[in-house]
């Protein structure tokens, strides 16, 4: 069975400081893992995805994530937060078919 | 540009009324999905369809109905049997050829008065 846990419901950072959003997963298969971002009253936009190629994945807007199989983690990072990064972020696991599991989301606040 | 179009963006209804949310995609994707989003609960799957004229219940299908008469279209009806319909509804699609990545519409916010 698959599951995904986002370890923080809210994260607050100052502009210009690093961002870390944590995600642990469980999967019986070799999973695909994704991070999506959602701004208020908008759909979800793909930030990055891991599909068993390089374990360090680079995405849009300076975000990246590292797949660590031994730790079953897929944490999202960014070296320097920008005000426009304030949004909700979802970690997602898929068995590459049509079964997709969403984390509960982490809301990122960025202080000026 | 290819994408997914949801309409209406905002919808108000009275209790006891059925409403239908539209979802159209021009990505030539095989599968389409409806999710419900409530604050602090992430996304929950209502229905999905992998092929025309076929669909399956998701985790919270009670009080909802769908149809898939065309590959491009997957409308969702929120019936009067849905006890708490006020929510943000998201339509998504993907294809057998990709890695599970979902493509989302902009969402429809339903408020029951």
Image (cartoon, rainbow, N blue to C red):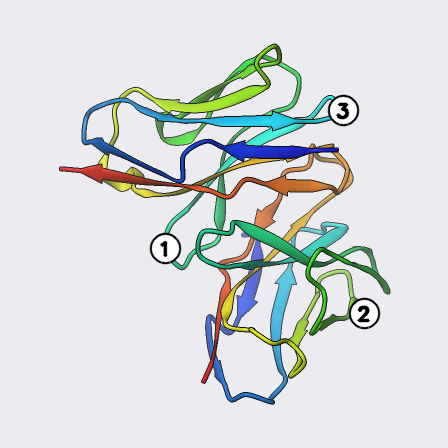
Which chain does the numbered disc 1 sit on? A
Q: Residues within 10 Å of mark 2 (few under 14, many from 20)?
A: few
Q: Nearer the viewer, mark 3 or mark 1?
A: 3
Residue at the image position 45 percent from the left and 85 percent from the top: B113
**Tag 1 and tag 2, C-beta contact below 8 Å:** no
Which residue is disc 3 drawn over?
A29
Residue at the image position 73 percent from the left and 41 percent from the top: A99
- Name the element at disc 2: loop
Residue at the image position 64 percent from the left and 76 percent from the top: B82
Residue at the image position 40 percent from the left and 59 percent from the top: A41
Which residue is disc 1 drawn over?
A40
- Given residues A17 and A48, the one toward you in this image is A17
Q: Nearer the viewer, mark 1 or mark 2?
A: 1
Measured from the top left, where is residue B17 in percent x and y? 60, 88
Gap in Å between the C-alphas at discs 1 and 2?
A: 32 Å
Of label 3 and label 1, which has the lower sequence position?
3
Q: Is B36 left, or right, of B56 in this rendering?
A: left
**Label of residue B69 in the image:** 2
């Amino acid at each position: 069975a698959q599951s995904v846990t986002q370890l923080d419901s809210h994260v607050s950072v100052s502009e210009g400081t690093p961002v870390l959003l944590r995600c642990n997963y469980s999967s019986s298969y070799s999973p695909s893992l994704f991070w999506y971002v959602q701004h208020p009253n908008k759909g979800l936009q793909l930030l990055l995805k891991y599909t068993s190629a390089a374990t360090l994945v680079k995405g849009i807007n300076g975000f990246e994530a590292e797949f660590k199989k031994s730790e079953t983690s897929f944490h999202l990072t960014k070296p320097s937060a920008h005000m426009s990064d304030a949004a909700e972020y979802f970690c997602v696991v898929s068995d590459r078919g049509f079964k997709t599991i969403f984390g509960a989301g982490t809301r990122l606040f960025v202080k000026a | 540009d290819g994408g997914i179009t949801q309409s209406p963006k905002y919808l108000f209804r009275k209790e006891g009324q059925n409403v239908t949310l539209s979802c159209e995609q021009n990505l030539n994707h095989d599968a389409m999905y409806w999710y419900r989003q409530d604050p602090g609960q992430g996304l929950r799957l209502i229905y999905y369809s992998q092929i025309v004229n076929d669909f399956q219940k998701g985790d919270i299908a009670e009080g909802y109905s769908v149809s898939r008469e065309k590959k491009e279209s997957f409308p969702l009806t929120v019936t009067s049997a849905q006890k708490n319909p006020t929510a943000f509804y998201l339509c998504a699609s993907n294809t057998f050829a990709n890695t599970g990545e979902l493509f989302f519409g902009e969402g429809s916010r339903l408020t029951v008065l």
